[in-house]
Image: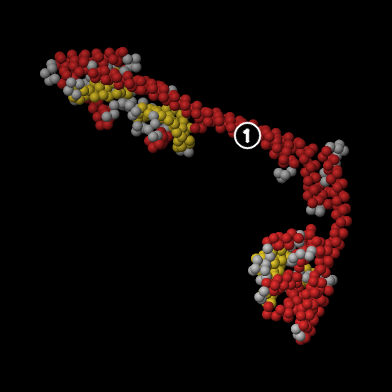
Amino acid sequence: MFYSLRSRLMLAFSILLILPITAVVFILSKESAEQIRKSTQTSTLQTIDQFASHVSTLLTQIEDMGNQVLSSGITQEWITADLNNESTKGEKYLAKQKLRELLSSYAINNSNVISISTFAKGKGGLWTQDLSYLKSSWYSQFKEQDVRWTQAHQDRDQADDSMRSREINSLVLPLVQLQSLKDVGVIKINYPTELLRQDMDKISFGKSGKAFLLTAEGLSVLHQDLTGAEQVLSGGLAALQKHSGGETSGIFPLRQGGTDYLFFYRRLPAQNWLIVGEVPEAELYATITKLKETLLLASFVLLILVIIVALWLSTDITKPLSAMARAMRHVKNGQFELAMKDMPKVRSRQSEVDYVAGVFEQMTHQLKYLIETEFETNLRRKNAEYKALLLQINPHFYNNTLEIISGLAAMKREDLVMDATEALGKMMRYSLSLDTDLVQVSEELGYIRDYLFLLKLRHEDHLMVTVRQDSAADQLLIAKFILQPLVENAVKYSLEKGGVAEVAITSSVCGERLHLQIQDNGPGMTPELIASILADTELRNSVGILNHKGDSIGLRNVLSRCRLYYGEQFEAVLDSKLYTGTTITLKLPLIER
């Protein structure tokens, strides 16, 4: 139990040691995770931005080179010679050779192994004169969708045989005669795919995270292997299309296939390309997860040590105190024999705990003797108080009854004087029978009927009484004379109000309780008076009722007697409304003969 000293010591050690460590673990792991998250995101975006800058620089150079080729006089001379039907074959061949030398010089002077080719309409490429390019995907995309920056592919029309067998990416530009602005074909500037793919493959996140260069449709620009990443890339591109808001770069979480990912992106607007990266969050945070597990393990080990230390302390401190606490609970319940059995053994060495245990054992012996001695005295005192309360009723009652008989005689009702005297005699025999404190409910109600007969003789039509008697309650036993004072008050105050006094008396069995109820239509009581009556009739104030001279003495008398007799098993409910009436309900335990 948590109120025991052992539990409190263990809890205290746990709070002093475990909670600070747990707080440190939580704060450290949270802050570390946040710092790692920010650092990772920043470094990853910086890496992607660096690669994007590199790609942009390269592609800008290629685009500038294409524009230079287009605007070159040699290129324009070749276009003019090729378009002029009057040009001789020798002139056309010479113009083509000059163009080949120009394009070769560009390729030689460029350190990135770039090659350039031109394709005239209806004719083959500059280097091979092969018309197969008309069926190529790059040419179809350029013509149909104006896609100038191609995906990785192979092209036979190269000045260098080494570039014919490897993958290339290209920039495709319209070949235009600047003088007439007539479109006569295309210029194709090629650069090795490996040039960008080597740098792209160097970008990685965690263990399995990769970066990809994609078109807006999600196709690989550099012919990278997308196996295993298709679903994540597809979901990331869909989310990017919905929520990016046009930002150039960024990062956002993504959940695919039950795994949480981080999705990075960087736009290349000029080429309509995307540099994207994906990595599972767990891989990025593997270090901090390991740290958290280590700290949690350390916390668990400390908890075990705390428990061991607390148990060790309990051997000398908490164990005897726990035994003494159990003994105290038995003493509280009056079970002194059980308390003696649970009493801790006092050892020879006198520690503070041993001293307290020894003193408590002596106190228990003395308390047992005093309680046993006091019990009989208290019983006799309580019985004397009860008899005194019972006798207090009689003078008050007899005075009222004699006034009724006197009133009948004054009214010359000799015929009813004999009936009244007989009823009074029956009531006197009932009241003078003090051999028992308990009577049946039916006997008490019979006494009340005799009493009401006398009241009815006096007040006639000004008094209406209803008795509802539950047969299930007739044989139950109740304390004697607990109804007559309540009925007397109900009649008295209802008549003082004026008009007809209406009194109802009810006996019933409700569950495990006997209910006796008296209801009237009198002037009622204030909440303050009700609270005062209930306070005065607590067990500790019962003796004071003997000398009470205030209001509602009969009600106070009855409630005090019931509390003396039934103790905590008795309950009284007073429901009263001013100028309307009062209902008094006595809830008593079921007592059978």
Looking at the image, which residue is at 79% across and 77% down? 402
Looking at the image, which residue is at 45% across and 33% down? 252
Above or below for 566 versus 442? above
Structural crowding at the residue carrying mark 1, measured as other residues with C-alpha within 10 Å and reported as few (<14), some (14–19) or many (≥20) = some
Q: Quadrant of the N terminus?
A: top right
Above or below for 110 versus 455? above
The picture quadrant where one finds residue 104 is top left
The picture quadrant where one finds residue 223 is top left
- Front residue of 561/13: it is 561
Residue 490 image offset from top left, x and y in percent: 71, 71
Residue 6 image offset from top left, x and y in percent: 74, 40
Residue 116 image offset from top left, x and y in percent: 27, 19
User: Which three-letter amino acid code belongs to the residue tagged 1?
Assistant: Thr
Looking at the image, which residue is at 72% across and 35% down? 308
Q: Is residue 508 visible?
A: no
Q: Is residue 265 visible?
A: yes
Using residue 221 as the reference point, say whether residue 503 is left or right of it. right
Q: How many marks?
A: 1
Looking at the image, which residue is at 67% across and 74% down? 498
Q: Quadrant of the C terminus?
A: bottom right
- Front residue of 365/203: it is 365
Residue 119 image offset from top left, x and y in percent: 22, 22
The picture quadrant where one finds residue 63 is top left
Above or below for 335 versus 508? above
Residue for badge 1: 22
